[in-house]
Amino acid sequence: DIQMTQSPSSLSASVGDRVTITCQASQDISNYLNWYQQKPGKAPKLLIYDASNLKTGVPSRFSGSGSGTDFTFTISSLQPEDIATYYCQQYDNLFTFGPGTKVDIK
Amino acid sequence: EVQLVESGGGLVQPGGSLRLSCAASGFTFRSYWMHWVRQAPGKGLVWVSRINSEGSSTSYADSVKGRFTISRDNAKNTLYLQMNSLRAEDTAVYYCAREEGGSYGGWGQGTLVTVSS
């Protein structure tokens, strides 16, 4: 089974700050990595697919990079509506989510 | 517009059974692989099961293998999850999701399953 880790588990940043979340896979997953945003009481929403592709309609301040085992998710300028938990998800071998990163406003 | 509406959740005793349904609309249901993903209260997302578009191939997380069965009725545009031998640790919101090349582009609103005596 492929295990996914994320860091940090939570962060607090100011509006306008650059926010970076990392995700690591326990083995090489190429670019088979997606990023989701989940707000409290809501279903997750796909933001980035195949490690670096922005889903249509998602603001360009969100971006992703990486391949192999190490991946990065970035919010270039944090906005109040970005308060949420963010999850990475691999699909190289079945499906596994990372534990999530909770993002708050400082 | 993609719509997925789950139903069938509720309170069940340990060892009991429950069948979840997910009604799909707004897209060609028979063309998509479908999944169930769950989320225990205050916890993260966990993949549960997957079924191919024809319903002929399924996969399960080890934690539910042998207890849960995923199925679909393409004529009724509906996905199912039969859950047997339920345990307290199965308590969660269960989401159905549409797979799009390995990602989940559409989600339902979720249905809560509580396993408790």
Image (cartoon, rainbow, N blue to C red):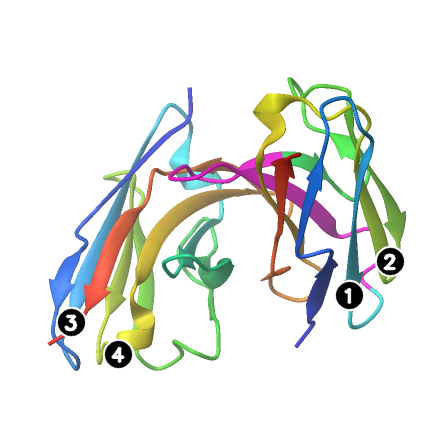
Q: CA distance from mark 1 to mark 2?
A: 7 Å
Q: CA distance from mark 3 to mark 4?
A: 10 Å
CA separation in Å, label 3 and label 2 = 40 Å
Q: Is residue A77 covered in magenta?
A: no
Q: CA distance from mark 3 to mark 1?
A: 35 Å
Q: Is residue B51 left or right of residue A83?
A: left
SS under mark 2: strand
Q: In percent of the image, x 13 and y 76: which residue is there?
A: B16
Residue that badge 1 annotates: A25
- Left or right of A60, for residue A55: left
Local packing at callout 4 (Cα closer than 10 Å; few below 14, some 14-19, many 20+) is some
Which of the marked residues, 3 or 4, is nearer the chain's N terminus?
3
Question: First in sequence: mark 1 or mark 2?
Answer: 1
Q: Please name the residue that numbered disc 3 is placed on.
A: B17
Q: Amino acid type of disc 1?
A: Ala
Q: Which residue is mark 2?
A: A70
Judged by depth in the image, the label closer to the viewer, 3 or 4, is 4
The numbered dot on residue B87 is: 4
